[in-house]
Image (cartoon, helix red, strand yellow):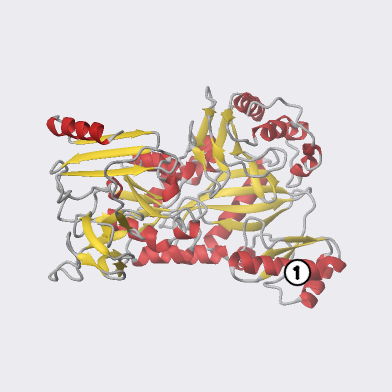
Amino acid sequence: MFRKILIANRGEIALRIIWACKELGIRTVAVHSDVDKDSLHVKFADEDVCIGPARNADSYLNMSAVISAAEITDADAIHPGYGFLAESAHFAEICQECHITFIGPPPEVIRLMGDKAMARRVFARAGVPVLPGSEGLVAGVEEAARIAADLGYPIIIKASAGGGGRGMRMVGNEEDLKVALDTAMAEAKAAFGVPDVYIEKYLEHPRHIEFQVLGDRFGNLIHLCERECSIQRRHQKLVEEAPSPALSPALREKMAEAALTGAREAGYVNAGTVEFLLDGQRRFYFMEMNTRIQVEHPVTENITGIDLVKEQIRIAAGEPLPYRQEDIRIEGHSIECRINAEDPLRFTPSPGRIRIFHVPGGPGVRVDTAAHQDCYISPHYDSMIAKLIVMGNSRTEAISRMKRALDSFVIEGIRTNIPLQRRIISDPDFERGELSTHFMDRYQQPLETPLAVSETS
Amino acid sequence: MDSNELKELMQFISSSNFVEFEMEQEGFKLRLIKAGARPEPHLDGRPGQSAGSGQPGTIEPAQVVIQAEASAASSAQPVVTEKLHEIRSPIVGTFFRSPSPDAPAYVEVGDRVKKGQILCIVEAMKLMNEIESDVAGEIVQAFPSNGQPVEYGEVLFRIRPLGSG
């Protein structure tokens, strides 16, 4: 096992990793930018190193500064969290060369899954259904038009190096194809450095269902069931839950088998997530695989009782998985709401100083956050300031628990999306479990008018 | 605070058991440290100690070092104003005072340095980054010891710019 782990991240996930290390008896090193010097992850780690100024490229994304910090503190492993360097195959390679263990999959697996068009091929080769679409990358508008005509509109153009909705364009008819292709390629070039795009059939009202997998270095690979993350706005997830209200045990087994087959084909090791779209006819299609710990991992931890961050660390240290598939049992229902520092009507970021911060508690409530009273929410970083996670015996109990927890989450000094989350959780469609990735569309217009619910945050 | 009050305060601190005294009011900040009060930084440069603790080196040569800063908004005139120029580490790494273990240090306290003169090395990922002085002046304080880890932004030297000292 490792003696000392450097955490190459900030905010709630850095703290989450520190808690896991403390429970495993491993010393921790926090790295931080100069504006983050008073952050909780700096205070709770055993050691801390300032690695640069606020700008991400100069600090949290600065590979040589992170490696240098690991060297001067004599850390033997680096946990990248999510975002920042978590899915950089190059960074994982540098760690390897410097004899520091990167807590994640091997670099070649990160690279393979990071190329979305390649990942599609790997899963298709393994017999996993993928959305009908282009064989690989699309060269030009003629080829795109031919593929789109075969598929039938609407189609979606996606960046091969993609993520976060950038380089992604939905196209409803042939007239709009050329402009959409050009903008998608330009966006992909700007965001990821390469203009490569591919085309998929566009599903009208799909659900986003993802499977958590865990693999060790000895070829053992298991799944920890699914999470449903259909409540999204601009491809950013807002509410996640496990298990999904849409899956029957038979469909769950079928999708899990597909996730494992694809992951095995990719040579997957450590924790990963296989994302699928599920259409109205209960047909599922592989979308992509994420090679990191996910923001929404706590809902899986709640229903399986497995600490995913500790498992990541144990696997990276070369230990075999302590569970077989038949040991995994789902119990109860868990929901997570992402609490963002943003205007609930206009979705614009709301940085500033938090004056009052009261966190909900009581049975079945977990709050993962690095925020606290009088802390400053910096405009330099992600707007997510907390994750409110509840656990119930049933979905109904989880929903009422989430409602009362949102009601007692008090944040003053900045604006948050808590009023919006209340509205989502109380929506009759949400309560019935009738979800799709277009769920949030209903709020685009009505939200321009003030919310009916009183705003305590 | 006028000069008499300051003298009184200094005498009081000198005769007291305090090793360090700091006060701040209305944009005026005063810090008194007794000579020899601070422990020597560890000299073996062993990694493992938190670089974050940023241990300053010994304070010399003055008996009592006074740093006073007055903000523009304040009308209080500090009696001792010395604007020392700080050289901060631009990267996280390991501090070296000389180009090689046997070579003499680039600079010593008391040396006069030119603008652009190399003051030390900060090593990161096996790369030796030479840190240059961006002012001409006299080295008043040198902080990290040889082989000590330094953070981004950590103060390496304080220099009295030429002409002001």
Q: Secondary structure at mark 1?
A: helix
- The residue depicted at 28 percent of the width and 50 percent of the height is B82
Residue A145 showing in the rendered view? yes
Judge by depth and name the residue closer to the eye, B157 or A453.
Answer: B157
Task: Name the quadrant containing residue A23.
Answer: top left
Task: Name the quadrant containing residue A387.
Answer: top right
User: What count of labels does the image hold?
Assistant: 1
In the rendered image, residue B103, in percent from the top left (x then y), is placed at: 14, 71
- Crowding near the residue tagged with mark 1, few <14, some 14–19, many ≥20 C-alpha atoms within 10 Å: many
In the rendered image, residue A232, in percent from the top left (x then y), is placed at: 68, 45
Which residue bears the numbered disc 1? A181
Horizontally, residue A436 falls left or right of residue B143, namely: right
Image: B52 above or below A200: above
The quadrant of the rendering that contains the C terminus of chain A is top right
Horizontally, residue A267 falls left or right of residue A332, namely: left
Residue A160 showing in the rendered view? no
- The residue depicted at 29 percent of the width and 66 percent of the height is B136
Horizontally, residue A116 falls left or right of residue B99, namely: right
In the rendered image, residue B149, in percent from the top left (x then y), is placed at: 26, 56
- The residue depicted at 17 percent of the width and 66 percent of the height is B105
Q: Identify which amino acid the numbered label 1 is placed on.
A: Leu
Judge by depth and name the residue closer to the eye, A2 or A409.
Answer: A409
In the rendered image, residue A219, in percent from the top left (x then y), is placed at: 44, 57
- The residue depicted at 34 percent of the width and 56 percent of the height is A69
The residue marked by circle 1 belongs to what chain? A
